[in-house]
Image: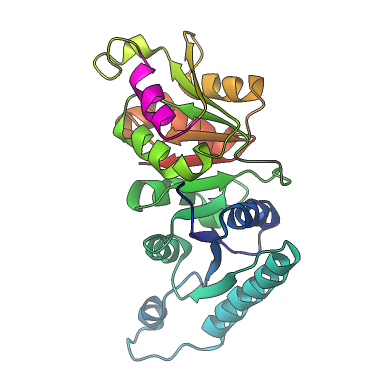
Amino acid sequence: MSMYKTIVVHVDDASHFEARLRAAAALADAHDAHLVGTAATGMSVAAYAMLTGSMGAMPGDEFDSLRASGNASLARFAERARQLGVRSAEGRLVEDESRAGLLLQSRYADLIVVAQDSPDAPAVRGLPQYLALHGPRPVLTVPAGYAGEPIADSIVVGWDGSVPALRAIDGAMPLLTRARSVRLALINPEREVGLHGDEPGADMALYLARHGVPVDVVVERTEWPPGEALLRIAHDNDAGLLVTGAFGHSRYREIVLGGATRVLLERAPIPVLYAH
């Protein structure tokens, strides 16, 4: 059975950090995984030196303050991880901005856990989609309201036949194989000619079943936008997790049409696992 053995969680001083830590801690416990809390100073030494006008400039009080803030966040992470029963954890401070730091850390992890995209956190706005689009690992986004509900008990998978959706399924396999119920959701599959075979969802359902996933196919024909339809299916099935490809169609088309990825990034009330 596949498992996550290294999980990276983004650490900062935001009020909703508790939600993503709870999710990461629960997954680390379920998979006996090592949890890496990663905080960023927000600026590299090289960038600081360039701003001061000299590559030879030594970081001063301002840079020390950024380090102190990051280390304080990591100290809170270590204490809460201990309280939540995480058996193996460490904190890492990266002297860079969050995107670059987490992107590097993602190379050596099985899963990246970050906050849901939110206008209330402009410093990291766009972080989930950046990591999904540019990183090698699946990204789990956690909404601020998450309070420790089971993630892998009931799962809805958005399947549109795309490569990003397939990568999301593969990235979620450690969760799918442990789930009590998995719904493979297809939204208006006849609109994606050539991606589903003669019977939409049948081939992917068979693939999942061979991995021991308890899967049912749900075909939804609706005028609702795909993202809204997936949220409704998740709600109706009391799902604790959505799994979906990020920007499964062209990114330009998704942005222009307000695609499923953007809806889920900003509005999903449950954790969502993405890959591209």
Q: What residue appears at the point 42 percent right and 75 percent down from the top-left corner?
A: 44
Quarter where residue 88 is shown? bottom right
Can see residue 202? Answer: yes
| Percent of width and height locating residue 202 | 37, 17
Q: Is residue 201 left or right of residue 183?
A: left
Magenta stretch: includes residue 198: no
Residue 52, position in %: x, y? 41, 83
Above-or-below relation of 146 to 89: above
Please identify the dominant SS of the magenta region.
helix
Whole-percent x and y of residue 172?
46, 41
Count all numbered tags in the image, as a single digit: 0
Q: How is the image coloured?
A: rainbow
Residue 186 vs residue 223, the one in the foreground: 186
Res 160 visible: no
Query: Is 89 situated above or below 226?
Result: below
Residue 202 falls inside the magenta stretch: yes
Residue 254 position in % (x across, y down): 37, 29
Q: Residue at x 42, y 35 (%)?
A: 211
Q: What residue span does the magenta drawing correspond to? A: 200-213
Please tell me in which quadrant of the rendered image residue 206 appears: top left
Report whether 83 appears left or right of 237: right
The residue sitting at the left extreme is 194
Q: Quadrant of the C terminus?
A: top left
